[in-house]
Image: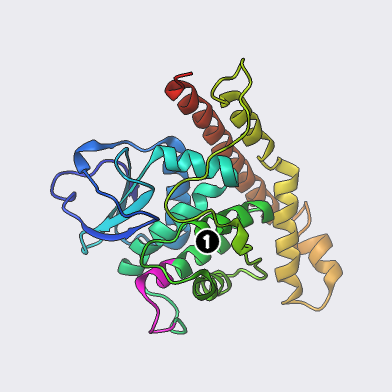
Amino acid sequence: MIGTIPNDAEAQNVFVCSLGTSGGYYPQFDTPPTKYALDVGKEIYDVLCPKKCGRVDLVQNAYVPNAMTMTTGNGYSKIAFSANFMNGVYNAFGAYAGYGVFAHEIGHHIDLNSSFPAQMSTSWSKELRADAWAGCALAKLNLPASGLLESLRVIAAYPSQTHPAWPMRWPAVEFGYKSCGGTSLVNPAPSTSTGPNTAPTSTSTKASTDPCGCEKANRKCVTRIIDLDECISSKQSACVSACQDDVDETDDCETEVCSDESPKYAGWRSSCKATIKVANTRCAEVLTTCQSTCTK
């Protein structure tokens, strides 16, 4: 399950992973996560561990440089993240950036509390195994193509200090993705990586009526949200692609199995509406956070 603030006994953690600069961690500064973080974390946990495999608590902490995972080793983990870091990757990469961050971090918890296909290389480090679980999560979430690429770019851009180079990480991500039902996957170009230690920031000139760029960030956020029809179309295309691997008649896939009249359509629509709701919530939080911290 996904929770928020742990009790004192659970808070005695062993460090597992920190994206970018390791930095310090002071649990006394933990605060509840944003609704967006909680919603995304729950989505990822539920697809990776539908039968439940321990507990993960998400917390905000101003002293965490980026995002980090700790564990007690007995089915409990805590992921602490910086709100500034999450806002930075969100503005730089897009509305689905958070999926990339939390897919890797929750992947560490799943790695310690579940099992993976036997084909996984026994030589992989815990970071590569978490990358594989992140790839698995992205496949099961069935994000739109643009959202999938945004998530991958964030995973590539923010390795931990113990991560190998991206050319070694990519096969693990791809393995996890294809092992969990994904088909084709685009390797994000190395140039999309902005470095491991700091969140990317905007260099655009701020208008006098919007001194901190809050309204501009919100507009940029909203324009990146996929609309309902496009989202459903993406899921139908994925359905047709998978269907064609199983049956001989392509027409049956398009007109029956994956059509608007198929039993799957209601599920696609419900899933897309939930995804769009999460994205809209995140946009509102970006605006509110920006305005509350603006000192111009």
Is 208 contained in the magenta span? no
Please provide percent x and percent y for residue 242.
Answer: 70, 70
Looking at the picture, does residue 122 appear above or below residue 56?
A: below
Q: Amino acid at mark 1?
A: Ala
Q: Quadrant of residue 8?
A: top left
Please provide percent x and percent y for residue 72.
Answer: 20, 59
* Lateral position of residue 142 relative to residue 6, left or right: right
Q: How is the image coloured?
A: rainbow
Please provide percent x and percent y for residue 16.
Answer: 29, 62
Residue at 39 percent of width and 57 percent of height? 105
Element at label 1? helix
Q: Which region shows up in magenta?
A: 121-130
Residue at 86 percent of width and 68 percent of height? 251
- Tell me the residue that label 1 is attached to: 156
Looking at the picture, does residue 16 appear above or below residue 3?
A: below
* Lateral position of residue 95 relative to residue 71, left or right: right
Q: Quadrant of residue 110?
A: bottom left
Q: Residues within 10 Å of mark 1 (few under 14, many from 20)?
A: many
